Amino acid sequence: MRIHCNLLYNTKYKYQEIWRYGVELKLKILNDILIIDILCALLIISIIFIPSTEVRVLIGLPFVLFFPGYMLKAALFVKKNEIDILEQVAISIGMSIALVALIGLCLNYTHWGIRLEPVLYCVAAFIFIMSTIAFFRRSRILKTYRITTTFTFNLPRWGEGTFNGVLSIALIIAIVVALGAAGYFVVVPKIGENFSEFYILGTEGKAQNYPNEYIMNDGLITQVIYSNGTVDVASKMGAVTIGIVNHEQQTVIYYLKMIIDGEKVSINFGGQITDSLGPIQLQQGEKWENSINIIPQHLADNQKVELLLFEGLETTPKYSLHFWINVVSAK
């Protein structure tokens, strides 16, 4: 940064000193392609090995909103004076948003789906491929004609008018406020919505294929038929998997109870019979997933199996899930 100060003589006001400041900021990037590749690698490493860190926020935003478009721009435009700095920034941001949306759309039609890891790896792969293309295209052009990685920003001179002076001050304030806001949101992240995930999984760990028909003989279950046609004659108990994930932003103790056809029923968990399964203590972001056995007590069709999740010592369930079963006689 260079600051110039000139002492001028004004003919209207004798010997009046008028200071005119000109600010020139030069930003030289040694290797923009290599820097972005390194930042992408750091983001991948932080997500894999450090689940929650500020690095993910600092690098994640430009990773989605700037890097893909910038690398595509670098691969397409390799000569000087093809596009200026403002056009480069606008193209990088606009194309990044479009590219990430397009990648997400394509992933939506695959078995990976739109999840963190597939999006991360696909966007990173695109960035690395474009950076390789940009590197080889630049290497084939004489250094004199390569696109510059030195950006010069000239702020308006105060002595050239009140408007230019106000504009300079407003620009400086805007930069300081933007940097301060970004730092604040990184250091003090916004707390998300408080909730708990509560779900039932059937056979093969999917939200389907629950036990839907029981065969009872003399008050005892002899067969269990699942909705996919599977018949269980060994356990004589219908099994489902219960999952709980804590997103309450604090440690929570859960209790699980079950009602079948309006009557409280004991839960068979790991061979132990209990009226209330718990306490299940989970920290923020922690998951509990285990299988429980369901044993109806009487014959009837369309019996409603209700699973109730309580938090702490609350007497009213916060979450509830249900499915339907038929219990028929073997005779």
Image (spheres, helix red, strand yellow):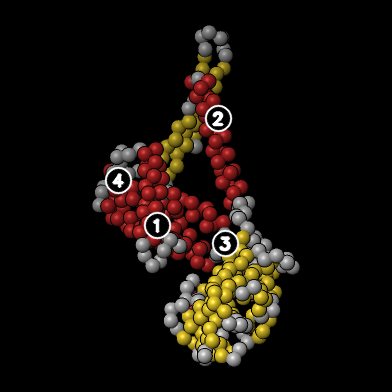
Distance from disc 2 to disc 1, alpha carbons, whole Å, reads: 41 Å
Residue 272 on image: x %, y %: 66, 85
Question: What residue type is disc 2 on?
Answer: Ile
Residue 62 on image: x %, y %: 46, 50
Q: Is residue 16 above or below residue 230?
A: above
Residue at (44, 35) in percent of width and height: 153
- Of 208 and 36, nearer the camera is 208
Q: Earlier in the sequence, mark 3 or mark 2?
A: 3
Q: Which mark is residue 235?
A: none
Question: What residue type is disc 4 on?
Answer: Phe
- Of 189 and 45, nearer the camera is 189
* Element type where label 3 sits in the image: loop
* Element type where label 4 sits in the image: loop
Count how many numbered circles sit on residues in the image. 4
Query: 10 Å neighbourhood of mark 3: few (<14), some, or many (≥20)?
Result: few
Q: Earlier in the sequence, mark 1 or mark 3?
A: 3
List the residue tagged with mark 1: 104
* Element type where label 2 sits in the image: helix
Distance from disc 1 to disc 4, alpha carbons, whole Å, reads: 26 Å
Question: What residue type is disc 1 on?
Answer: Gly
Residue at (54, 74) in percent of width and height: 302
List the residue tagged with mark 4: 77
Asked if marks 2 and 1 touch (Cβ < 8 Å), the reply is no
Query: 10 Å neighbourhood of mark 2: few (<14), some, or many (≥20)?
Result: few
Q: Earlier in the sequence, mark 2 or mark 4?
A: 4
Q: Earlier in the sequence, mark 1 or mark 4?
A: 4
Q: Which mark is residue 52?
A: 3
Q: Most extreme residue toward the top, as rendered?
A: 12
Residue 254 on image: x %, y %: 67, 70
Distance from disc 2 to disc 4, alpha carbons, whole Å, reads: 34 Å
